[in-house]
């Protein structure tokens, strides 16, 4: 971009809201919809967009020259970019192949993208694809968007979709900017990507006036999810995407859940169906979908018919996404959003109120067609006084009826639990993970937890903590304009492992990293904990088991201070070595463990790039 292009701030104007009643149904005022929905999609101010550049050289040089005064008490240094709100997937025909994508924001360059990390050795190391998804058109700039979503088909083809809010620099001041859902696919596990000719799922336009949205000139879409039919029926490898469509009618904004289908033999989404009806719901959002073991497409969403009673709803298609059943209720839930102007609004300290969502997820049992739903709420019909909690419900009859919701978190405190993810393993075990503040009396610091059900969701095992270091949510959004972690994490599974993936701010300086844990389901041990960052790699610890010494290889792309520790199976520190400066390149290291008793231990490597862990045994 030419440096002399003048810009002004993209400010989502706060305009007084008037609620218009029609046929006794509460309407969502357009200005209120703009303030709430579009505020989180615009990621940069207009001044920041002025600095849009295709070069990161200055930032990289700054990082290379940065010196880290590292001590046990000091927070690790800041990074130049923040990554948050992730999605991930595991290849159904090769579990070594895992992909992850976050929203990456660079506020110095005013650049946003969704980089694709891929591993082909079960997370031992990660590479980054060269694919650049934003801006959608060359010569344009992206002012926001994100929402990366993956889906593998039954043959291992990987689909990727995202939202881009883009236009010319001048159009963000006066004119129309584009907001659309786009897609691409990869046939090599996420390394290389192809954008088909028909790469647009939905494209809308927003009219800008003095840097603020003034009108939705054609319907826009928000928060898409994808799923593929992996059954052997006639719809095998159909790709489905559900999303909310937002349109403007005078002073009112209309929200509708829709689903589009790309048949397996097509390169475009040729089938479109509505899931919710505008005449029935005054507000809908936060859809999620899954294809069950019979090929039925299930969509859930948060919605209200009267503007005051919130609920989760379910709809199903039995004909390949051509049509959907009339939505039926899963459960009421207490989760009051700012857009609805219901007092009191429900809050979780440390999360921006405009970014606080119920984040429902749906999953299906691969063996019996059971459908499971988890979500965040403050109660069912009212506030239960226990903070936000993780709820769960099951349907065994294709969504016709649902079990009474149960609370999954077992802390029995008033501390917050939120943003759950769910996966069902091939053996029908249900896994749920979430952020959890049970250990902090101030109710602001979170760990990441998970639990398991082995009886189809009737009961859940005692909750287990995954993280060894808390994240202080009072500081989590300080580097990305209160975007924080976003709203979504991901839980994956292979035959023998549970793989939670989450955004982690344990440095408590606003720097957010992606972490993954590989939990052996046979022993419940965390075998490997990794920061998803290709700046640092660690090889296996050998010999393993060891009697006197352990060896490991460390690879760094840039000079960095390294802090090495050994902890036992109870997270107790056994050895704590003085931090040292590691020169870029490969370095082989040896540690004497002859004085450490027999047992299970973890080698912990801390650096500016995050944390790595490797499990090893001492046996004599």
Image (cartoon, rainbow, N blue to C red):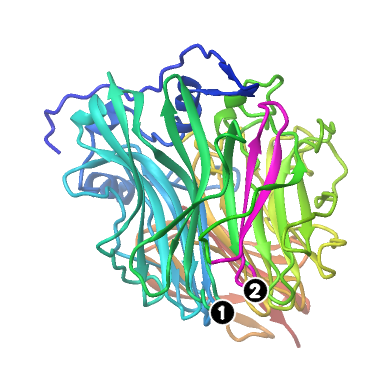
Q: Which residue is mark 2?
A: 294
**Eyeballing the image, is 519 above or below 260?**
below
Residue drawn 77% across and 64% down?
Answer: 397
Which residue position is annotated with label 1?
233
Tell me, yes or no, whether the two marked residues, 2 and 1, touch with CB atoms within 8 Å: yes
Q: Which residues are magenta?
A: 292-319
- Which is nearer the eye, 396 or 424? 396
Residue 215: where, in percent of width, then height? 35, 25
In this picture, residue 177 sits left or right of residue 560: left
Q: Is residue 295 left or right of residue 203?
A: right
Q: Does any portion of residue 448 appear in the rendered image?
A: no
Comes first in the chain, label 2 or label 1: 1
Q: Residue furthest front?
A: 23
Cα separation, mark 2 vs mark 1, equals: 8 Å
Count residues near mark 1 (Cα–Cα under 10 Å), then give few for <14, some for 14-19, many for 20+: few
Asked whether 106 or 80 is in front, the reply is 106
């Amino acid at each position: 971009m030419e440096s002399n292009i003048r810009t002004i701030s993209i400010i989502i104007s706060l305009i007084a809201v008037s609620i218009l009643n029609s046929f006794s149904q509460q309407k969502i005022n357009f200005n209120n919809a703009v303030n709430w929905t579009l505020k989180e999609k615009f990621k940069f101010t207009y001044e920041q967009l002025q600095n849009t550049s295709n070069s990161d050289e200055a930032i990289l040089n700054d990082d290379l020259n940065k010196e880290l005064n590292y001590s046990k008490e000091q927070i690790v240094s800041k990074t130049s970019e923040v990554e948050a709100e992730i999605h991930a997937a595991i290849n159904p025909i090769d579990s070594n192949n895992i992909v992850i994508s976050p929203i990456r924001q660079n506020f110095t360059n005013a650049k946003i993208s969704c980089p694709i990390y891929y591993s082909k050795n079960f997370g031992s190391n990660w590479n980054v694809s060269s694919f650049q998804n934003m801006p959608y058109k060359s010569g344009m700039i992206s002012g926001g968007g994100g929402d990366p979503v993956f889906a593998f088909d039954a043959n291992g083809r990987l689909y990727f979709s995202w939202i881009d809010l883009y236009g010319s620099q001048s159009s963000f001041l006066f004119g129309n900017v584009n907001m659309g859902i786009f897609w691409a696919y990869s046939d090599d596990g996420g390394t290389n990507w192809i954008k088909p000719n028909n790469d647009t799922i939905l494209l809308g336009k927003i009219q800008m006036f003095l840097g603020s949205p003034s009108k939705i000139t054609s319907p826009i879409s928000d928060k898409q999810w994808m799923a593929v039919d992996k059954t052997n029926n006639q719809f095998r490898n159909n790709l489905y995407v559900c999303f909310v469509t937002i349109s403007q009618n005078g002073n009112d904004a209309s929200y509708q859940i829709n689903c589009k289908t790309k048949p397996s033999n097509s390169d475009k989404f040729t089938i479109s169906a509505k899931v919710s009806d505008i005449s029935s719901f005054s507000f809908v959002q936060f859809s999620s979908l899954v294809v069950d073991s019979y090929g039925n497409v299930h969509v859930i969403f948060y919605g209200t018919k009267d503007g005051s009673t919130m609920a989760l709803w379910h709809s199903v298609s039995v004909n390949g996404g051509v049509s959907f059943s009339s939505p039926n209720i899963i459960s009421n839930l207490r989760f009051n959003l700012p857009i609805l102007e219901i007092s009191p609004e429900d809050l979780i300290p440390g999360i921006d109120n405009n970014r606080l969502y119920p984040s429902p997820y749906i999953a299906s049992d691969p063996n019996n067609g059971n459908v499971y739903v988890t979500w965040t709420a403050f109660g069912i019909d009212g506030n239960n006084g226990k903070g936000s909690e993780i709820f769960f419900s099951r349907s065994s009859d294709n969504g016709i009826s649902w079990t009474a919701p149960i609370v999954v978190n077992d802390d029995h405190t008033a501390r917050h639990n939120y943003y759950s993810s769910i996966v069902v393993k091939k053996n029908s075990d249900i896994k749920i993970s979430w952020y959890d503040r049970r250990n902090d009396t101030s109710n602001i610091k979170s760990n990441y937890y998970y639990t398991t059900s082995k009886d189809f969701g009737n009961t859940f095992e005692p909750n287990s903590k995954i993280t060894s270091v808390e994240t202080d949510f009072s500081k989590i959004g300080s580097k990305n304009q209160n975007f924080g972690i976003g709203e979504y994490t991901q839980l994956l599974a292979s035959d023998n492992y549970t793989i939670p993936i989450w955004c982690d701010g344990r440095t408590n300086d606003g720097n957010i990293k992606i972490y993954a844990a590989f939990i052996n389901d046979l022993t419940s041990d965390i075998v490997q904990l990794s920061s998803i960052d290709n700046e640092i790699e660690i090889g296996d610890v050998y010999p393993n088991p060891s009697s006197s010494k352990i060896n490991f290889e460390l690879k760094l792309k840039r000079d960095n201070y390294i802090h090495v520790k050994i902890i036992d199976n109870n997270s107790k520190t056994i050895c704590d070595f003085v931090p040292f400066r590691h020169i870029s390149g490969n370095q082989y290291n040896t540690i004497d463990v002859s004085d450490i008793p027999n047992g299970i231990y973890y080698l912990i490597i801390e650096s500016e790039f995050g944390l790595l862990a490797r499990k090893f045994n001492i046996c004599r």
